[in-house]
Amino acid sequence: MDKKYGVYICTGCGIGDALDIDKLCEVPKEEGLSVKTHPFLCGKEGIELIKKDIADESVNSMVIAGCSSRINFDVFKFDGCIVDRVNLREQVIWSHPRSEYPAPTEEQKDDEEFVDHVQMLAADYLKMGMVKLEKIDLPEPYKLETISKKILVIGGGITGISSAIDAAKAGYDVTIVEKESSLGGYAAKIRKQLPLKYPYENLIPPVIDAKIKEVEAYPNITIKTNAIVARIAGEPGEFTVTFKKPGEKIEFDVPFPLPDEMKVDENGKELDVEKLAEVYAEYNKGKNDILTLDPNGELFGAVVLAAGWRPDKPEGDKVAHLGFGKLVDVVTNHQFEEIAAKGKVIRPSDGKEAKSVVFIQSPGKSDDDSDFDYCGSVTSLVSLKQAKYVREDYDDGKAYVFYQHMRTPGLQENFYKSIQQDEGIFLTKGNVVNVSQNGDDLIVEADNTLLGEKVQVKADMVVLATGMVPATVDDSVVNLAYRQGPAFRDIGLFNGYCDSNFICFPYETQRTGIYAAGGVRRSMTIEESMEDATGAALKAIQCIESVNRGVAVHPRSGDMTFPDFFFQRCTQCKRCTEECPFGALDDDEKGTPRLNPTRCRRCGTCMGACPERIIGFADYNIDSIGSMVKSIGVPSEDDFDEPPFRFLGLVCENDAYPALDIAGLNRLTYSADVRFIPVRCLGSVNVIWIKDALSQGMDGIFLLGCKHGDDYQCHFVKGSELADIRMKKIGDALASLALEEERVAQFQVAIDEYDKIPEIINTFVKSVEELGPNPFKGF
Amino acid sequence: MADKYLIEPDLNFVKKIVGLGGDTLKKCFQCATCSVVCPISPDNKPFPRKEMIAASWGLKDKLVTNADIWLCHQCGDCSTMCPRGARPGDVLGAIRSYAISEYATPKWLGEAVNDPKKLPMLLGIPVVIFIVLGLITGLLDFSPEGDKIAHSSFFSSWLVDLIFVPLAAWVAVVFGMGIKRFVNDIHNNAVLEGKTDKTKLEICGFLKALVKVLPTILKHSKFSECGENKDRATAHLMVFYSFLGLFIVTNIFFVVLYVFQIHGPYSQMNPVKWLANISGVALIIGSALMIKNRLAKTDQTSSYKDWYLLGLVLGLGLSGMLTEMTRLAGFAGASYFLYFVHLVFVFNLFAFLPFSKLAHFVYRTIAMAYAEYGNR
């Protein structure tokens, strides 16, 4: 497109008072660009001014300098135009008040040594905006040639059925695949279930039968029982799915990546590419490569993963003192449910009526008060439910619950209250230290109960509130024909659950187009599973309807860009394929990456990873950011006797950039020598930008992004962590240039930690100032 | 403290407590607000939280023998502040009522006192005894002569004493047996639960402690520490002192009759009569106030045992005063009838004293003395 530039500066919100606007207008004028100012650019008159230029002057690329791009984004939106917003308000005048950074007085105006920090900051940002416009293009959406709008639901339990019904109601074709011979899953194997509606007080018969009838009545729902997914190939919108019978071996079984120990020879040396391919072929003999599509495969647009869970069977020291495995009458909640589903509650050992049953919520004994593995509020509720079974079966029945945590969220609190009202159910916090046989009875001993330091209870049976192990722990289930492997990537944080970020991005797995719900996502009740199913169904629909329009699904919903590769220069290093947090890239046998655009979340991690810098987006690439860096004025001793320092801050636009804006909004001030550039994710930061900045004499560079680690907040799971690794590696390169590694740093900030921003920035600035100026300055 | 406590919940006990007005007991979720807000609970092992959990677990042995249930004056602060509506005050009241039946023999009588269906029987017993004994001995004269109305000419003082002196002795025996068990039990319980620094129960020290707490009881100073039901203290104080007054008057009458052979009725100018009249009026006003308070407090549970006692006390006061007034007005028939009714009330109050809620004055006094003795 032929770009016709226009620069518009808003002088409202105090910008005109704080800055010398005439001087600022010189910046674009020097470049030969037209510049207009308006005291209220976002108002009707201001917008008309821009629109008139679009109509009369064919302006199609504009820099709009004023407030943050996070504000009025809908106002400054013009079809077919490239717009860049220069943040003069939040990040210039609000965070650098004239009271702290005075404007030159009349006498100082001609003083060449006077440093007007704020004016320089504004001028730099304007320049950066102008140069960015030059380097970016309007994106064109990626559209699949064929698109399937069908939704595949893996798992025919309560979650899968509910999800299928919800998607079908919304008008989508759904296929349920269930490995058992009939639908229902665990929900069909229980005696009673927890209440689903007000007053949430009484147990109800399982709703699963009615749900199965309902799902079978939908014409747009296909049910495949006795079937599992052999492989899911391709990408959202056109997943090619091969089904098979459980246990069957077929050529479209998904190949597995080589385990690490097979990637090296007997001396521990890494195998070369050809040898690796050979070993891989041998390892996956009889299976087609991931890039070979099954001609008989069925096409789906998105997948709901509702594969459920299996009851845990605790082992080892953690439960030895509870007699589990040794005493027959000590059972898990699952075993108890099986007994209760058959009839009256009886002891497994001799079939005697179990009139006194102790429910144990936490393994106890040690100082660790955690519950059994894979537990949750559901195990608390199940204990209450099963305690009620004892009371239903026997008038003189007694049920005891020893808990460390009693979790009954939401209105299930009412259920807890109703259980508590039962005179034969006894609840106490306590640490169970031992279960032993004493004649005909079991004796349960507990410490630190509400009733005293050490207590004992006689029991006919003991029930352990063991957890729900997600299906993804034992099996890859989804069997993705992805180069990164058939399962969800285990990032060591989720205990085998397939979530990406449980709190921020529910249902979203680390694989775009696959949405988890129910017990596979966390241990949950039938009620929660049904609600979860709706969420995942809606996500699957969102995915299909985004892919359909060629835009990103989440978290950059609506983004039309996607990574573009300049393959001539690709060295097949595979870094992009391996580092992509979402497995969007598959490489062919030579190692050349193959993008699956609809799997992509547009974070740019590949762009940050690529050593050849051949990956970029239409409006965000190595050159556009690199040019912005280069356009920053770095004053040297030629300009001033004491030139001010210059710092570059590469800022994650998801959380850190808003935090900066909020800091400005709160008039928190920080060094005026820092220039910020927003990036899609710290994972997209290419080391070249840092090298460029240092070689042009900038004194320090820092990355400001999301928290990583256990409680990570990165919107792209791994971006800020990868950046951290890359920044550590850059230290060596700096040392070879005789630069201190302290000149490059990375800081973590959450969106609500705006108050910490000034300290983070000023401390870094101060520490670099102590190191002295960058010796490359002025070269 | 015992090494390990074997928990054996008594489901029937829970049902009983629920029936006695503690129907909210299972609602407790052990937040301990009750123990914190209680103005009279001690810092060490405070009540009523531990009583609430023990009650919901049906641990009868931890409650009936527990002196703490008697230290509670049921002021209601805990019930008002309870976030769960578990009403600890009412639950303790129910437990006390259960404990009273536990320590009184025979048990069936205790149960009868707490059973509204047995009320006609309880009222019938004195009527039958009075009439049968009166007819056998001839001490009951249905057509008394003389111009002056003297109740003894209708219901001979001999007959009164023939009935009430043995009755008093019986009450004393029942109480004595109960108290002996009670004192031992609360001591053992206190030692077991670490609520006392005494290991042995010494009678002498205990009696000293009893003397020490008497001023507290006489002044109702514990009662008035309560926040929620402060007004109840006044009414209770009135009833308490009127009973004390009437007790003194009755004893003076007894002594005067048998030692000086002087019969009533006394002149209205007699100071003993003054005390009697003041006490009688105070009894009516006090018990009426109590009833009014209970009726006004719709959020407080009032069970049958409460109404039985209050009805009895008011009836006693009213029948007594009316007897005197009809006598002074010269309505002989009415006065004699009312006197009979009055005696029925007296009998009920007296005979069932160890079984009714009124027994609290004995148990609470002992518990308070024990708390003083054991440095609770």
Image (cartoon, coloured by chain):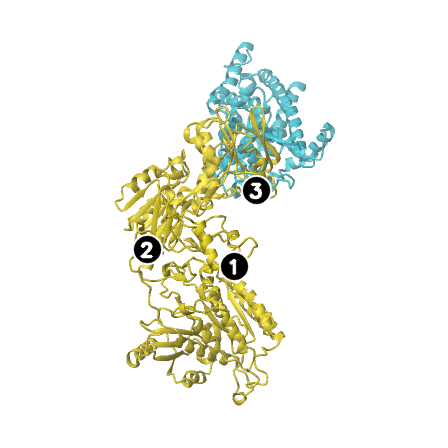
Chain colours: A yellow, B cyan
- Name the spot of residue A418 as percent of width and height, x first: 45, 37
Q: CA distance from mark 3 to mark 2?
A: 60 Å
Task: Please rate how many residues cluster around mark 3, counting C-alpha atoms within 10 Å: few if below 14, some from 14 to 19, many from 20.
Answer: some
- Name the spot of residue A562 as percent of width and height, x first: 38, 65
* SS under mark 2: loop
Chain letter belonging to callout 2: A
Asked if disc 1 and disc 3 are in contact, CB closer than 8 Å, the reply is: no
Q: Inspect the image, locate mark 1, and give the three-letter code of the amino acid beneath it.
A: His
In the image, residue A681 sits, relative to residue B66, either above or below, namely below
Q: CA distance from mark 1 to mark 3?
A: 41 Å
Q: Quadrant of the N terminus of chain A?
A: bottom left
Q: CA distance from mark 2 to mark 1?
A: 33 Å
Q: Inspect the image, locate mark 2, and give the three-letter code of the amino acid beneath it.
A: Glu
**Left or right: A358 with respect to A410?**
right
Q: Which residue is mark 2?
A: A238
Query: Is A615 or A652 nearer to us in this picture?
Result: A615
The mark lying in front, picked from 2 and 1, is 2
Q: Which residue is mark 1?
A: A708
The part of the image, by quadrant, that contains residue A450 is top right
Seen at 46% across and 61% down, the residue is A574
- Name the spot of residue A51 as percent of width and height, x first: 31, 76
Q: Which residue is mark 3?
A: B32
Residue A25 can be seen in this image? yes
